[in-house]
Image (tube, coloured by chain):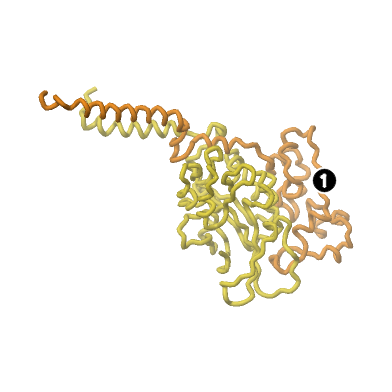
Amino acid sequence: MNLSRRHFLVLVPAAAVAWKAILAGTPEEAPNYNQAEHWWGMLIDIPKCIGCGNCVRACEAENDVPEGHFRTWVERYHVTDGNMTNPEVISPNGGKDGFPVVQEDAGKYSFVPKMCNHCSDSPCTQVCPVGATFVTPDGVVLVDQKYCLGCAYCVQACPYGCRYIHPEKKVADKCTLCYHRITKGLTTACCENCPTGARQLVDLKNPNDPIHEFLKTHAVQVLKPQMATGAKAFYNELDGSVR
Amino acid sequence: MSSFKDAGHLFRFAGLFVLAFVVFLVVRHWVVPKTFGQYGHYRGASIGEIASKPVEFAGHEACEACHTDKADEKKAGEHAHVNCEACHGPLANHANDPAAVTPVKPDTTVLCARCHTASAAKPKKFPQVAPAEHSNGMPCQTCHNPHSPAMDAGGAK
């Protein structure tokens, strides 16, 4: 083979890139799962949420979430005046035990489930000094708890308050989008247990996912869009008072 | 060569630099985990570690594979979209070994009220009752079949 220097210089980096792609592959523990085929997010349909707290309890059961901390929680917004800046917000025990009954029907109410938005330009991963938190190739923000120092920079950096320091492990902890479930073809614990379908796991890389049609036909918003975090928790009919 | 005549001290100093660099490479190889940098600035193996955690909720498909009668009953009723473990709790252990782990039946007095207790904050279309007036403290399943709860759809017991 007669290889000119010019071609050699082109081929070597190309081969290096190709070899890196081969080495990347899939996680060993999920042999039938290809990260390159997915880009995960969540659809939260506010008009469907009844504030039962099933998602909070399911998350706790699935992920051993420590008492007093939440990977997902539900807030109840109550807006009585025309001013969207002063909503009355409650979230007793993260909404885990439901919400107090309301008799009088004044103003507007909405239940807003909150969780990690699995941002594609996540502020939390950018501040980690040791590379212990990251966005996976399939769009999930995870924490490597063996590598985390527990410095809590990420806890401060998250604009949605979705991270906490685990009281026993002393490392950052957060929603994994049930990565151990979605890589096995299951949905997340919160979506599996939502009785009204208010929460739905969505795969933005799957052309057959109903999310594409939903985004085209509904008034969908993400939280704090002005921060350009690339949030992938899509809220249907989100009230302007929600922060 | 005459220009290098008195440069011995420079070579010794350069040697020190080379030695320090080699030591750095060796220590780095030893300290940095093998998979660090596999996908990005993090330990690639941690993705697999997180993915390998066992599941607690088996998922409704696992339930429906065996409990076909209940699945069919539920499919026809108002609770078609409510998955099994939303009421029955996490039962992956039962799905893995049905004989060893027997699920406990949920108490409908508490369970149904979690969703169906009337509150002005809930969406208007959602069916709601004040449990005390509605049933006088009787368990809901006295009248309703939880898998197909509507009274007019043959759901009544």
Residue B152 horizontal side relative to residue B53, left or right: right
Which residue: 44% across, 35% down?
Answer: B38
Using the image as rendered, state which of residue A109 and residue B16 is in the foreground: B16
Which percent across, then down, holds residue A213? 53, 56
User: Three-letter amino acid code at disc 1?
Assistant: Lys
In the rendered view, tell whether residue A241 sits above or below residue B17. below
Chain hosting mark 1: B
Which residue: 72% across, 63% down?
Answer: B126
Instruction: Locate the C terminus of chain A and report the quarter of the image it occupies.
Output: bottom right
Which percent across, then down, holds residue B123? 69, 65
Q: Colour of chain B?
A: orange
In the rendered view, tell whether residue B150 sits above or below residue B102. below
Q: Colour of chain A?
A: yellow
Pointer 1: what residue?
B105
**Location of residue A144 (image quadrant):** top right
In the rendered view, tell whether residue A153 sits above or below residue A235. above
Which percent across, then down, holds residue B41? 44, 40
Report whether residue A175 is seen. no
Residue A17 horizontal side relative to residue A136, left or right: left
Using the image as rendered, state which of residue B13 and residue A65 is in the foreground: B13
Report whether residue B151 is seen. yes
**Location of residue A6 (image quadrant):** top left
